[in-house]
Amino acid sequence: MTLAAAPPEEAAAGAATPEFERAAARAESRRGFLIAGPAYLYLVVFFAVPLGIVFAYSFADRNRFGEAVFTDPGFDAYRRLAEPIVRDILFRSLWLALLTTGICLLIGYPFSYFLTTRSPRARNILLVFVMIPFWSNFLVRNYAWRVILGKDGIISRIADFLGLGEAEILFTPSAVVLGLVYGFLPFMILPLYASIERIESSLIEAGRDLYASGWQSFRRILFPLSKPGVIAGSILVFVPSLGAYVTPEILGGAKTTLLGSYIVTQFLTARNWPVGASLSFVLMAVMLVATIVYFRAGGRNL
Amino acid sequence: MTAVAGRPLPGASAVRLSGLARGFSLTRGALAANATLVYLFFYAPIALLVVFSFSADRNVGRWGGFTLSWYDDFIGNTSIQNAIWVSLRVALVSTVVSVVLGTLAAFAIERFRFRGRQAFDALLYLPIIIPDVTMAVMMLLFFSEFFDLINLLFGTDLRKGFASIAVSHIAFNISFVSVVVRARLAGMDRRLEEAAMDLYASRWKAFRHVTLPQIAPGVAGGALLALTLSLDDVVVTQFAAGPGATTLPVYVFGLIRRGVTPLINSVSVVMLVASIGLVLLSLFVQRSRSSAAVGPQGAVAGRSRRSS
């Protein structure tokens, strides 16, 4: 906790300020460090260290008993990610996550726009009704779809009644996308709503006065201005969809293994910890990039 | 719901709708229909689940007359009782610890400049953005490799189970609490603290009597967020839990994977009611304290990860 640690502007000013002010700044720095201390220490021990362990494991090898060994650290586990099986899983996860994001945007955008057209009082109530499913138990909400899509479920009986025959949705990628859209739609709606709500309606009015059609004023005015919300919402949906584990486990089938389940399998059954660790890291890298994009798009303010 | 307030004209919203859909009642109708369908989509599955939890038919999707027997099964099931008990204890411990640590962390970051502040800031954000599965893997490796070491060094008797679940929940909850409290601190007038200290209040007294009452809604919001996240978590808990202890969501997740039974319906409904109760409570806390408390947006980023 020397002066060198102080932020640059203070350090620069330090040369000109009297000694006691520097001492005060130093005491302030020490106090801040002490207050942050417990949480800092906790996160280093129980978060940074575990993260480091996973990182180390991603460079380990596997011996014939399935144990990770560090005899010859290298990129073997990362190289295995290019194998067809893993590559297929990566692409499938990517595709389903993109699909989920696209569907959420298609449903969520008009919905959010509709919300902004209501009176402030009605908006508050309507928003609360978006928040309730958003905050209620995710596992249970996915389970509800299992009941609905199941063999005796309402969907298959409706299909039966209409003479469409056996509608097999459960345990297919469609069911997974349905579950993901159900789970993550509020993540699209809330930032979209926040950004559309801020747009001056007079801008659209002005466009209309200059003979823009409804579609033109959407394409040229509303959509460009709401872009931060579109980006933020898309990331908030895409990222958790990519790493989803619970939804594919409940609604997906054995043939539609996704990234999250595959990582878990590597640790619990296949006992290939290095591959699991390297995949976890790839997933985290995607997440970090997305987060940077999110903040660049002004996500912090949404 | 900060973003909701502050629209200048009460009639502005009506103008806006006519802005895009001027004269086209078709567009207007389509928008309203879409919104109705979205709400139906949100609530129909939940409603069906509640209805079928009272159905006497053993097939979960069929109506076989009204019964409460699945709730009887649920109440009489000792494994579920144990799981609930573990869930509640973990939630309580992790909430209390993470509220204290998270609030201190938020205060330090918002009010002090200290060595390692930026690194700490980054470290504080990581648990929020890291994928569930990655965090779960981290906890698995950490506990399998290092619990023995910790026990050896500190003479403790830590086993995978209650302690490891609580430890991992605290690890993610600290960050969520601090994000919520920071938002509140950032919106608070610093001059109030400075005024208190000018009047010879010590730093601690200023914090205790000026800062803390001001940020109380944020702290309460953070606590409710931590409680909800802890009660909902499946993936991280599953990896941090040993054979000794499981939480209710992990237990239910296991049941679902083995096959769907009416018992799960009744447990699910109870979990649903509990979590909706918490939501309403947090909305109520925010409303009664007025002004900008947690706000949906602040929580959005946090919530996104915790529910895959």
Image (cartoon, coloured by chain):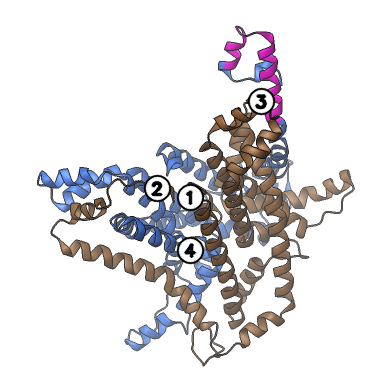
| Residue receiving disc 2 | B3
Kindly indicate which chain is depicted in blue in the rendered structure: A
Q: Are marks 4 and 2 in contact (CB under 8 Å)?
A: no
Q: Which mark is residue B295?
A: 1
Over which residues does the magenta segment extend?
A: A10-33
Residue A171 left/right relative to B251? left
Residue A108 left/right relative to A135? left
Q: Which mark is residue B115?
A: 3
Disc 2 crowd, CA 10 A, few/some/many (<14, 14-19, 20+): some
Tell me the kind of residue under disc 4. Answer: Ile
Q: Residue shown at 53%/61% (left/top)?
A: B279
Tell me the kind of residue under disc 1. Answer: Gly
Most foreground residue, A71 or A197: A197
Q: Secondary structure at mark 3?
A: loop
Q: Which mark is residue A132?
A: 4
Mark 2 chain: B
User: Is residue B308 at all visible to an observer of this figure?
Assistant: no
Q: Are marks 1 and 2 in contact (CB under 8 Å)?
A: yes
